[in-house]
Image (tube, rainbow, N blue to C red):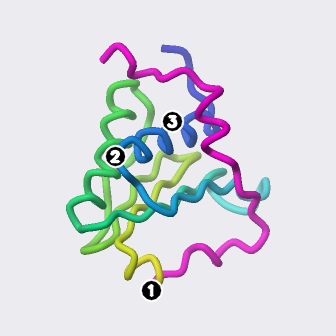
Amino acid sequence: MEAVSAEELAVHACRKMHDKGAEEMRLMELPEGSSLFDYVILANGRSERQVSTLIDEVYHFCKRHKIPHNPVEGEAGWKLIDCYGVVVHAFTEEMREYYDLDHLWPDVQDIDFEHEMALLPDLDQDD
């Protein structure tokens, strides 16, 4: 597989989570040079189990396509995976409100991930 850019990985991660029923998903592009990563994804799961499923989908996508990533981290109600240029968070609604990462980066650009998903091929369509 050809190298996947951070932006493409972010959109693929959104697709994987969207397909598993993620709610209130937000894809943010951080200003250049403001952080160690370029994109942040925030999403809600309806239960602890779904939160884990959302992150597992991204983890397995990275493994299948040999995309560098760190192990899944987190605690009850919040899981994340650091894929270097992209960090993906899945929360229960309560934990998302508690950590309030939506307001951590004031100068982000929100990306219309649904529009972007339509432009990228589904790399797992043959799996």
Helix, strand or loop for disc 2: loop
Of the numbered discs in the image, which one, if any, rests on residue 20?
2
Q: Quadrant of residue 35?
A: bottom right
Magenta residues? 98-127
Of the numbered discs in the image, which one, if any, rests on residue 123?
none
Q: Quadrant of residue 115?
A: top right
Helix, strand or loop for disc 3: helix
Label 2 – label 1 distance at C-alpha: 23 Å
- Which residue is at 51% across, 35% downward? 12
- Which residue is at 56% across, 75% downward? 101
Q: Which residue is mark 1?
A: 98
The amino acid type found where label 3 is placed reads His
Question: Which dot, 2 or 1, sits closer to the camera?
Answer: 2
Q: Which residue is mark 3?
A: 12
Which is nearer the eye, 47 or 107?
Answer: 47
Q: Is residue 101 magenta?
A: yes
- In this view, the residue farthest toward the left is 49
Q: Is residue 56 left or right of residue 101?
A: left
Query: Which of the two discs, 3 and 2, labels the residue nearer the N terminus?
Result: 3
- Which residue is at 58% across, 59% downward? 26
